[in-house]
Amino acid sequence: MMTLQPAAGDGARKWRSLGLLTLAELLALAPWFSAAAVAPLIQSEWGLTAGTAAWLTLAVQLGFVAGTLVSGVLNLPDRFDASRLFAVSAAGVALTTTGLALVANGPVDGAVLRFLTGACMAGVYPPGLKLAATWTRRHRGLALSLIVGALTVGSASPHLVRALLDASWRPVVLVTAGLALAAGVLVLGGVRQGPFAAPAARFNPRFALEIVRAPGLRLATLGYLGHQWELYAMWAWIPLFLAQVVAKEGGQPELAAGLAFAVIAVGGGGAVAGGWIADRMGRSVTAAGAMAVSGSAALAVALLVDGPLWVLLPIMLVWGFSVIADSAQFSAAISELSPSQYVGTTLTMQICIGFLLTFVSIHLVGLLVDGGPHWAAAFGVLALGPVFGVVSMLALRRRPEAVQMAGGRR
């Protein structure tokens, strides 16, 4: 199928569009972990256990899974303008997050609103990846890594907001809602599909199953599952772990929030570095290497879980940097191995399956730590994901269709 080729001078438009899109993703995804950032305050106000409070994060994951499933089956990112889908969804994220701050008075209505926030996020993150993919082929790994880096810093931003605001939890959540609304306005006014966009696809719900039928797509998705098993559970629970470590050493909650921001946000640099390396060395080998480092860091934290902050923090920064460095390469691989007219659908379905798994790992860590400080077992369990992911990506590297990735660099 014929696709448009970039004209002379499109380089500046490409990087301007990718820059605006990256900023919009960062802002739109700020509400994702807004409840996790203020979890101790919500627990105190509503009288919740750590396990019950975790449902405010789990509800977002479940809503995102439901939203991506519907979006993928209906081929929404491939049938409709991705910029408008992004803008409308970001407005939905802002509205439901505002509801959490102004309306919710308990865990039930809070979880319902968080579920709706996650469902709206399904129209932000996958379409953002698709938009980035339409702007480049040669630098696709880097382009998608910018979006993943924005996801990382955006997810960490509520911890920074909390560290800066000496307020109750509701103003912190309201700030993240405002950021999401600004993201929708930014994309609606300044971001369009790039020259490598395919024509709008026909409705084909059966194509959603292609991700499990085609061997290359299946292996890329299995690698992504190993990555997701570790990533979101680490992001969800590291703030509480740091809060306990800082409190044990006599520090203030604001310090723990700032450190949580640093440990998660450093992954923005990891994502960009991973994309730059993958475009030059190959998707599968880069992803496997990043997972080997992050899995090792998880095990190191598990072994040193009772150590002092000055020992744990450097390891956690390495963990935060490496845990996301591979993420964009699974999406880039999917975009290169899929038929161009259904890239949005396959990306959405890969993300749907991966986020469904995060529900299990986040909940499992909650069960391990809710009855006591069993952090060593929890972090050890998370290290199993990278092991599975490394095996899957090295298997993909041996597949003949892997030459379609990163210009033949596999």
Image (tube, rainbow, N blue to C red):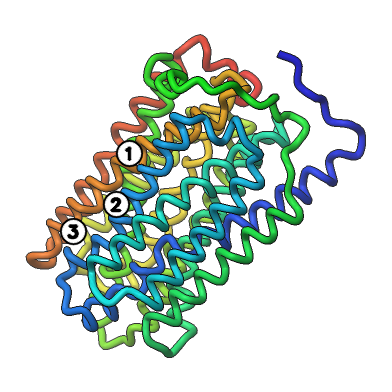
> What distance separates the C-alpha of mark 1 from that of mark 3?
20 Å
Vertical position of residue 18 compared to residue 349: above or below: below
* Image coords of residue 84 (percent x, y): 65, 47
Return the mark for residue 124: none
Residue flagged by tag 3: what amino acid is it?
Answer: Gly
Q: Quadrant of the N terminus?
A: top right
User: Quick one: 99 or 394, which is closer to the camera?
Assistant: 99
Residue flagged by tag 2: what amino acid is it?
Answer: Ala
Q: Nearer the viewer, mark 2 or mark 3?
A: 3
Vertical position of residue 341 compared to residue 319: above or below: above
Report the residue marked by disc 3. 366
User: Which residue is the extreme one toward the top?
Assistant: 400
Return the mark for residue 298: 2
Vertical position of residue 293 compared to residue 183: above or below: above
The answer to the question of whether label 1 and label 2 lie on touching residues, with beta carbons closer than 8 A, is yes
* Image coords of residue 143 (percent x, y): 65, 42
Return the mark for residue 386: 1
* Image coords of residue 17 (percent x, y): 75, 48
Q: Earlier in the sequence, mark 1 or mark 2?
A: 2
Q: Residue at x 49, y 60 (%)?
A: 93
**In this view of the protein, can residue 409 be seen by the observer?**
no
Q: Is residue 201 left or right of residue 263?
A: right
Residue flagged by tag 1: what amino acid is it?
Answer: Pro
Q: Residue at x 39, y 35 (%)?
A: 224
User: Quick one: 191 or 385, which is closer to the camera?
Assistant: 191
Q: Quadrant of the C terminus?
A: top right
> What distance separates the C-alpha of mark 2 from that of mark 3?
16 Å
